[in-house]
Each structure stands twice: as structure tokens, then as C-alpha cells.
Image: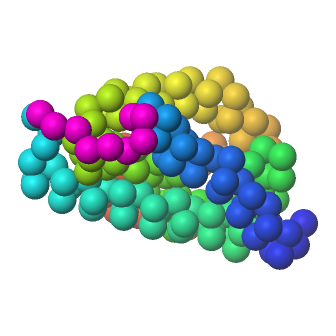
Amino acid sequence: MTRRRALAGSIGFLFVGPLLEAGIGPYVVTGGFERGDGALDHVVFTVVGLVLVVLGALVVAACIARFIADGIGTPSPLAPPQRLVARGPYRFVRNPMYVATAALITGEGLLIARPILLIAAALYVVALAIVVRRSEEPLLARRFGASWEDYRRNVPGWIPRLTPWRADA
């Protein structure tokens, strides 16, 4: 696979992955992103929500860029990376795209004062934790062997490290 094909595949993945999960899904769950009222209807939650949405989107973009540049592949299992991606956001947490997408969903919930999206974000993380544990991690172990095991031992799956991991350290 070339980087050009990885770019095209990653753009396609963006539409069936994060944009579906953090865009269409929340839109359907809330019935149209109409602002709620109640406990979350406060300027502090709105600001925190906006920050989470922006940071989540930036991390998703950075993850996709790393798959293209470092992995020469996509985040999709249909066109997986040729090399282990362990730079950028992946130096802090093994599942940054999932964490960022959950942050996006949470941020949307805070931004539009809709608690149902906070529940949706929690369910999203639980479901993906199961998929990662049962499917993705065994596949990565088979595909990348010792380099995956070293990475897995040093980088947490869901709660980011405070300092970036360096493979050569």
C-alpha cells in the first residue's frame, strides 16, 4: 500500500468510523442535537464540552495522520497498517482514537446539555474495550509480535500516560 492509498482509505474510514460514531449516532440518539435543559445547562459544561469536542477531533485527525505516515495503512481492519503505529497520540495511550471519539461524544453531551450522550459515551467505551480485548489486541500480537508486546507493556490501553512513551527508552 502507498501513502496515497492509505490517505484515501483513511478518509473513507473517517466517514464509517468516527463521524458515524460521534456525529450520526449522537444525532440519532438526541433526535437532532437540540439543546436540553436541566443540570447540564450551564456555561461551564458548555465550555468543557466545546474543549472536549475540539481536542477529540484533533486527536482523531492526528491518529489518522499517524496511520498514513507511520503505518502506511489505515485504521480500518480492511486495510491495516503495515507497521505498528506507536507515535503521536499512540505514545500516550494504545486506543487514542477510541478515547478521542468518546471525548467527542461526551463533549457533545455537555455542549448541548444532553445527559443521554454521557451514557452513550460510557457504553461506547465499554463495548469497544470488549472488542479491543477479544479481537484487536490478539490480532496486533500476531501481526507485530515482540514490538507489540513491548508497546502493550509500556502504554496503557485507556487512560493516557502523563509522559510520552519512547520505544528506545
Q: How many marks?
A: 0
Depth check: give the residue in front, 90 or 61.
Answer: 61
Q: Look at the picture and state if 124 lies above or below 74.
A: above
The reply to whether the magenta stretch includes residue 68 is: no
| Residue at x 76% of width, y 70% of height | 7
| Residue at x 55% of width, y 31% of height | 128
Image position, residue 12 (x, y; %): 75, 58
Determine which quarter of the picture holds residue 132: top right
| Residue at x 52% of width, y 60% of height | 60
The reply to whether the magenta stretch includes residue 34 is: yes
| Residue at x 9% of width, y 48% of height | 42
Depth check: give the residue in front, 128 or 28.
Answer: 28
In the image, taking residue 8 as reference, residue 157 lies left or right, namely left
Determine which quarter of the picture holds residue 68: bottom right
Q: Look at the picture and state if 63 lies above or below 140.
A: below
Which color mode does the image show? rainbow
Depth check: give the residue in front, 33 or 130.
Answer: 33
Residue 169 makes an appearance in the image: no
In the image, taking residue 2 as reference, residue 166 lies left or right, namely left
Q: Which residues are magenta?
A: 30-38
Image position, residue 147 (x, y; %): 68, 52
Specify the quadrant that holds the N terminus.
bottom right
In the image, taking residue 130 as reference, residue 104 lies left or right, namely left
Image position, residue 33 (x, y; %): 37, 44
Image position, residue 3 (x, y; %): 81, 74
- Dominant SS of magenta comes to loop
